[in-house]
Amino acid sequence: MTGGLRYATAAGRWVLAATVLGSGIAALDSTVVGIALPAIGRDFHASVAGMQWVIDGYTLPLAGLLLLGGALGDVYGRRKIFVIGTIWFAIASLACGLAPDAGFLIAARAVQGAGAALLTPGSLAILQASFDPDDRPRAIGAWSGLGGVATAIGPFLGGWLIGAVSWRLVFFINLPVAAAVVVIALRHVPESRAPGPRAPLDAYGAITISLALAGITYGLIAASAHGWTAPEVLASLIAGAALLAAFCVIETRGGHPMLPLAVFRSRQFSAANAVTFVVYGALGGALFLVPVVLQEVGGYTPLAAGTALLPLTVIMLLLSARSAALAARIGPRLQMTVGPLLIAAGMLLFTRVHGDADYLTQVLPAVLVLGLGLATNVAPLTATALSAAPAEHSGIASAVNNDVARSASLIAVAVLPTLAGLTGDAYLHPAALTQGFHTAMAISAVAAAAGGILALATIRNPLRRPSAQAGRVPAGPALAGSAQGVSAPGTPATAGATPAAPATAAATPSKVEVSYLHCCALDGPPLRTTEHEPQQPQ
């Protein structure tokens, strides 16, 4: 279904407002919860495992149900599912804010994640369906830019609320925004559905992948308390792996799979997603720990801890378009190799953080190098994943790439603290936390560097050919997470998640056409504005 709304009209602005606010509450939530972790841990006397579940309890259903959420909107109406997801998210946010203990909070976060899986895919899909094709790029650019502003404001607002009142306000603030989204959507957003006959939903696939991720995540987190050879740990990991294999069988044999595995027949697409998994896993696990260390070791206030990572967002906003343009000219391989190596260097610089964690000499250099690595890598990485997908699967490619990033962050948050020796109440002991943090940063650096090496070995630049104009390339998936994500905090966020502004690369006939895409890998399918021509690797 193609809409005809114009960007400059009042009707168009109302639709834009609803989608920006809707995706904004999910992005804001993922940004500030990581900053609130130390306060939550102290209030509930939670262990490191409990804090891991506060993050992963949300990311798990979001990653498992995201593709199903998009399909529900196509079948039953994008506005309807968007509104249901917003109400669901708001009710769960209220439950999170009223949580009497850590167990209740984790359960409420899981419900919140399921609501986000309904809400998140709808925002961009509504823009695609509602606006006139000539105005879609402008509307999506405004949506992405305003989303970036919301992500930048999140650490300030969240840190202030946590320090001035309570971490509970981080969840309560979602309620009035969600109410505004519902009112605006019901009054001003037109309903839309996918054209053609209604396709069956892949409920079995969604349930299977969600249970698989739950089993793997539980096993990885439980290993910190019970050891890797404990029966319950082994049983959980084996069950998760078996369910993951069952998911592949279901998607292969099903008539209407939510994840057509044929999309991975493209070597370039598979390689780009493998790099995404490794790099965003490194980011998600590392940035999960940064705000905790800044507060518990460096004595930062929640506001200061949230502000400390702000340069990441600023650098991404300033340089993503230029990085996309450069990749359009020279191909993505160089940036996808150098970017992860810079990310690894930034993580190694975090191993210098100790004592009072002086911002100018210890924290800022690491943040700046990490931000430069992200800006170098993210746009080419996402553009490669999307442009390499077969034409018949172009719509699913963006959702797959974002889901890979979220799943990587989910697993990394579960396993990294265990590998680094951060268990029990270690986060309450500055010396133990510092030592574990340094180990975690070193592990993450190795993983990020491995992503760069993997890109060098597997990514191929497209053949140069004449092009009348450059393709529009996305600035990349939001890192799902919080200060665990440049949903980041991730990540990888993203989500999570930091919506990044689409980049426009002006090309001459001698430059490479990456793809004619307008999209954001966080929330929905790309909008293809010209016919896709298969690229031949060099």
Image (tube, helix red, strand yellow):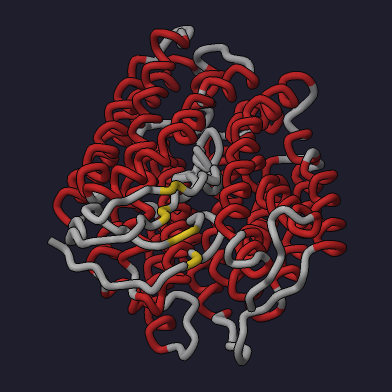
Image label count: 0
Find residue 439 and report its horizontal and vertical position in percent.
32, 28
Name the residue nearer the viewer: 356 or 151.
151
Name the residue nearer the viewer: 53 or 134.
134
Find residue 224 and report its horizontal and vertical position in percent.
43, 41
The residue that appears at 37% across and 17% down in the rendered structure is: 365
Q: In which image quadrant can residue 448 be found?
A: top left
The residue that appears at 79% across and 38% down in the rendered structure is: 173
378 relative to 25 in the view: left or right: left
Rendered position, 234 above or below 393:
above
Find residue 297 and report its horizontal and vertical position in percent.
50, 15
The quadrant in which the C terminus is found is: bottom left
Find residue 136 and report its horizontal and vertical position in percent.
59, 60
Name the residue nearer the viewer: 324 or 32.
324
164 relative to 503 in the view: left or right: right
Rendered position, 40 above or below 321:
above
The residue that appears at 42% across and 39% down in the rendered structure is: 320
Q: Is residue 289 visible?
A: no
The quadrant in which the N terminus is found is: bottom right
Q: Is residue 243 visible?
A: yes
Rendered position, 309 above or below 224:
above
